[in-house]
Image (tube, rainbow, N blue to C red):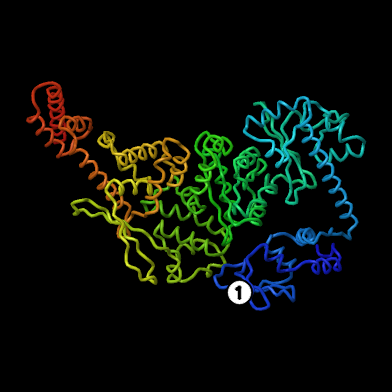
């Protein structure tokens, strides 16, 4: 590749740029004597070992030994080849990269002609949106979607009028231009090969731009419900659909204000979000997330949030994105997953709920690690040895795809904690030539963050639950105590660990309470039973978007910050016992406050009776007066007790 470009051009190009400017726009440099220093962008480190010598126009890392010119840096940092790096630096220097190869010169000329043709088409479509006699239908549609003229202009939205030959008549004015329209994918040959017609007709047009703002293709949408709803340009010498991202050219300009990219599913999602001030959204062109997409994304930002519909198709797409992302997630890069409430896409949600709700949803999105383990845990029982073995077998091949680094180490450590299998044993299951990468056990322990543990005080008269925050040993700080009322403790356990809901059968007593926090617990329990597959983040995400539930989110979110499982509990059964004890305590207190008739009604609804239930029914049978409605209740009590005695005799 380097031989295709004259060395004198490379030398001249490097003389026109300053390596400090090139590197300094991508990482933060600090003046250190006559040189500049930084933490190396190519490996994980806390002490800067990356040095840039301005006088030599050279960089070098004393940690990983990577170094070279500005050209080498761009190739390594942007993850692009030599020719692409030359193009990047040429754009900075304001010069045009040459080619000495005749065939490449011809190819370059052809590409330029296609760019020019698509630019003409782009301008034609935008003009039609303003002037065509049928443009009212298109502008009405855009207004109906809540889009302004300013946002339409920003994204270059246009209109392909009805008719078969609008482009042919206006852009394809001769044989050569018709040939270019054909090569750029803008016209289609008739089946009989005897004629041509426009590819895009009676549709809203969305130009697809490359990172330099050049139009490389188009997407188009109908204005009714006819099919296909969307069509795209076919692949051409300058357009490969699976590699391009709609809106990236516009979004990259906003990264200083919103330093992350939000990947959504459609053109109108991107534009609708921008209309409401969320300017960092991009979209694939109807394809799954690919390695090429991620490479482009991570050139511009270190964080991406995948936004999917919460339906089956959305979760399937999220699963594919997860597996693709694992191979690209080098240390310092972050991926999160956001699932929208049922029936919503980004466009409908932000129009219905507004910008702040949508931004709250982004903040509540799932880290990749959490989504990964939740997805892999589906259908696996971690209460059994078989389940833990199965879980390890499922997870380890995927974790092995992650590039070496701290993140890979932490994922393995998380798997070890969930299964009880040591990280050393897990490493034996991973066929990795670099298994010695991981630190010693003591070094791994030093990476552990402070954790929150919960204790359940059975002897406390006030039934207060203490949450101890254990600091890292090196900090030598005293334990901090948080005191939680029983219902807070109970709700905190449930929102942090929704699977505990299966241990509760009867909430009839709680349903009679007028206490707001108890009502929140009941609503949360009902929600988890309706959506048993939802985890903590998904629950909060849904509640934020529901006006009836949103007011409770801050209360629940404060409880999610506490890990209420005690470190002293060695099994999930112990933790379930904690939860059941707390629930029983809250239920007993509510029950004891009920009038006697209400107490009887609660017990009579139970399918099975405990010893305490039977004793209370006998007591009420003798204490309740023989007048209505108590008389009717007494008859019901008698029948319940008779049934209880009969069942007991049968069992004997």
Q: Residues within 10 Å of mark 1 (few under 14, many from 20)?
A: some
Looking at the rendering, which quadrant does residue 95 occupy? bottom right
Q: Is residue 407 left or right of residue 274?
A: left
Q: From the viewer's side, name the closer residue of 603 and 391.
A: 603
- For mark 1, what is the residue? 49
Vertical order, 318 against 5 (above or below): above
The N terminus, quarter of image: bottom right
Q: Residue furthest bottom?
A: 33
Say which of 44 and 194 sits in front: 44
Q: Foreground: 483 or 414?
A: 483
Query: Which image quarter: residue 162?
Result: top right
442 left or right, relative to 402 = left
Query: Can see residue 88?
Result: yes
Query: In the image, 509: left or right of 256?
Result: left
Q: Quadrant of the C terminus?
A: top left
Q: Image point 23% across, 44% down: which residue?
A: 584
Q: Total marks drawn?
A: 1
Q: Is residue 90 above or below residue 337?
A: below
387 up-or-down from 342: above or below: below
Percent coordinates x, y for residue 64 in the rendering? 62, 72
Percent across and percent down for residue 186 are: 80, 37
Instruction: Confirm whether residue 570 shows in the render.
Output: no
Q: Residue furthest top?
A: 628
Secondary structure, mark 1, is loop
Residue for point 41% across, 59% down? 417
Give percent across and percent down for residue 614. Answer: 13, 35
Residue 441 placement (x, y as % from top left): 43, 70
């Amino acid at each position: 590749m380097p031989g295709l470009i004259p060395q004198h051009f490379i030398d001249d190009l490097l003389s026109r740029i300053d390596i400090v400017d090139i590197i300094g726009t991508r990482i933060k440099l600090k003046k250190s004597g006559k040189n500049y220093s930084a933490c190396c962008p190519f490996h994980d480190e806390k002490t800067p070992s990356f040095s840039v010598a301005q006088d030599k126009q050279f960089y070098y890392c004393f940690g990983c030994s990577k170094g070279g010119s500005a050209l080498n840096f761009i190739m390594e940092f942007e993850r692009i080849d030599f020719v692409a790096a030359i193009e990047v630096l040429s754009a900075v220097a304001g010069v045009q990269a040459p080619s000495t190869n005749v065939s490449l010169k011809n190819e370059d000329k052809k590409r330029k002609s296609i760019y020019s043709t698509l630019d003409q088409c782009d301008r034609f479509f935008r003009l039609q949106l303003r002037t065509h006699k049928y443009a009212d239908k298109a502008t009405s549609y855009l207004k109906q979607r809540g889009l302004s003229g300013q946002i339409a202009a920003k994204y270059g939205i246009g209109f392909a009028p009805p008719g078969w030959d609008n482009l042919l008549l206006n852009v394809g004015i001769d044989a050569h231009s018709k040939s270019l329209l054909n090569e750029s994918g803008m016209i289609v040959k008739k089946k009989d090969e005897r004629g041509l017609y426009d590819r895009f007709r009676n549709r809203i047009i969305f130009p697809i731009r490359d990172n330099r703002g050049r139009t490389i293709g188009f997407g188009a949408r109908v204005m009714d419900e006819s099919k296909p709803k969307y069509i795209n340009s076919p692949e051409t010498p300058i357009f490969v659909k699976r590699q391009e991202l709609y809106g990236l050219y516009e979004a990259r300009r906003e990264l200083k204000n919103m330093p992350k990219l939000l990947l959504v599913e459609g053109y109108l999602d991107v534009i609708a979000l921008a209309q409401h001030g969320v300017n960092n959204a991009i979209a694939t062109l109807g394809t799954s997330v690919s390695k090429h997409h991620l490479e482009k994304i991570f050139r511009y930002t270190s964080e991406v949030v995948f936004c999917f519909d919460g339906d089956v198709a959305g979760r399937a797409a999220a699963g594919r994105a997860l597996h693709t992302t694992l191979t690209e997630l080098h240390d310092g890069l972050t991926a999160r997953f956001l699932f929208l409430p049922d029936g919503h896409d980004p466009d409908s949600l932000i129009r219905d709920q507004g910008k702040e709700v949508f931004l709250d949803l982004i903040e509540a999105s799932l880290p990749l690690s959490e989504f990964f383990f939740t997805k892999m845990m589906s259908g696996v029982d971690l209460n059994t040895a078989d389940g833990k073995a199965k879980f390890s077998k499922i997870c380890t091949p995927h974790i092995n795809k992650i590039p070496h680094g701290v993140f890979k180490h932490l994922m393995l450590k998380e798997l070890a904690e969930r299964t009880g299998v040591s990280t050393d044993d897990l490493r034996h299951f991973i066929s990795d030539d670099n298994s010695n990468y991981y630190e010693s056990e003591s070094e791994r322990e030093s990476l552990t963050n402070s954790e929150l543990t919960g204790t359940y005080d059975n002897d406390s008269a006030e039934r207060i639950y203490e949450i101890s925050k254990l600091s890292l040993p090196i900090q030598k700080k005293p334990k901090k105590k948080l005191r939680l009322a029983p219902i807070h403790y109970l709700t905190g356990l449930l929102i942090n660990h929704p699977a505990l809901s299966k241990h509760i059968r009867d909430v009839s007593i709680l349903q009679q309470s007028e206490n707001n926090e108890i009502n929140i617990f009941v609503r949360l329990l009902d929600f988890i039973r309706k959506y048993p597959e939802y985890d903590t983040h998904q629950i909060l995400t849904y509640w934020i978007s529901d006006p009836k539930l949103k007011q409770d989110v801050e209360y629940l979110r404060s409880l999610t910050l506490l890990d209420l499982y005690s470190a002293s509990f060695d099994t999930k059964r112990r933790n379930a016992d904690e939860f059941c004890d707390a629930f029983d305590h809250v239920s007993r207190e509510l029950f004891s406050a009920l009038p006697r008739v209400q107490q009887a009604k609660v017990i009579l609804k139970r399918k099975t009776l405990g010893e305490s239930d039977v004793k209370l029914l006998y007591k009420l049978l003798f204490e309740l007066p023989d007048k209505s409605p108590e008389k009717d209740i007494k008859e019901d009590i008698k029948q319940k007790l008779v049934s209880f005695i009969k069942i007991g005799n049968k069992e004997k």
